[in-house]
Amino acid sequence: MEYINDMTLIARMAIGGDKKAFDQLVRKYQSRVRKFFLAQTLGDSQLSDDLAQDTFIKAYTHIGQFHGTSSFGTWLMRIAYNTYYDYKRRATPIPSLERGDEVPSNSPLPREGSGVGLRLDILQALSILSDSQRTCITMQLIDGRQIDEIAEITNMPLGTVKSHLKRGKDLMVQFLKSNGY
């Protein structure tokens, strides 16, 4: 049913130029896209909002290239993934806890009071991962995506995604254990 609703909105947008239809798609998917970027940027909400906006602009301008072979959400996350990596190729480094940069207060990770330093430790654990490991872990644990969907979005072989997930989780567990968890 969700697929049919999305396809109806996409058709209204692509064929009739119905901007309200696209606005409905934005409202439906904006929190998922923003969560992805918040995790990738280690909680930088301003950068996450900018990247999300770029993602939706790209989706709007390329809506005619959506063929429906995957869900609109998967197609949109592929655009988000590419937007993030385009940004990474040309940008300055994201905040690093190791460099002593300020820790963002609106991270998608556990809130203050959920354990002494847990939120900071999870941010730090994410910051030690490679970009590919962090992307795969974010998509699986925060977005709830299946491994095959992560492979489709990232254009990585299934085995590579599984490897990034295992290694990333192992590194996070090792880091958290060394910090008393």
Image: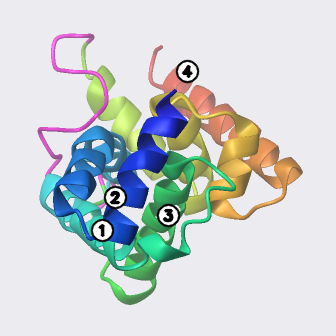
Q: Identity of the amino acid at label 3?
A: Tyr
Image: 18 above or below 31:
below
The circle drawn on residue 81 is 3
Q: Are marks 1 and 2 in contact (CB under 8 Å)?
A: yes
User: How dense is the environment of label 2, judged by Cα within 10 Å: few (below 14), some, or many (20 and up)?
Assistant: some
Label 3 Cα neighbours within 10 Å, binned few <14 / some 14-19 / many ≥20: many
The residue that appears at 45% across and 32% down in the rendered structure is: 142
Query: Disc 1 marks which amino acid?
Result: Gly
Evaluate if marks 2 and 3 touch, with contact meaning CB atoms under 8 Å apart: no
Is 137 on the left-hand or right-hand side of 119?
right
**What are the residue bounds of the magenta stretch?**
97-115
- Is label 2 or label 4 in front? 2
The CA distance from mark 2 to mark 3 is: 26 Å
| Residue of label 4 | 177
> Which quarter of the figure has residue 152?
bottom right
Residue positioned most to the right: 159
Q: For this rendering, which residue is in front, 78 or 67?
A: 67
Residue at the disc numbered 2: 12
| Tag 2: amino acid | Arg
Which secondary structure, mark 3?
helix
Percent across and percent down for residue 162 are 79, 42
Residue of label 1:
16
Give the main secondary structure, helix, strand or loop, of the magenta stretch.
Answer: loop
Q: Nearer the viewer, residue 65 or 80?
A: 65
Please report the residue visible at 29 percent of the width from the left and 52 percent of the height from the top. 97
Q: Furthest residue to the front?
A: 16
Local secondary structure at mark 1: helix
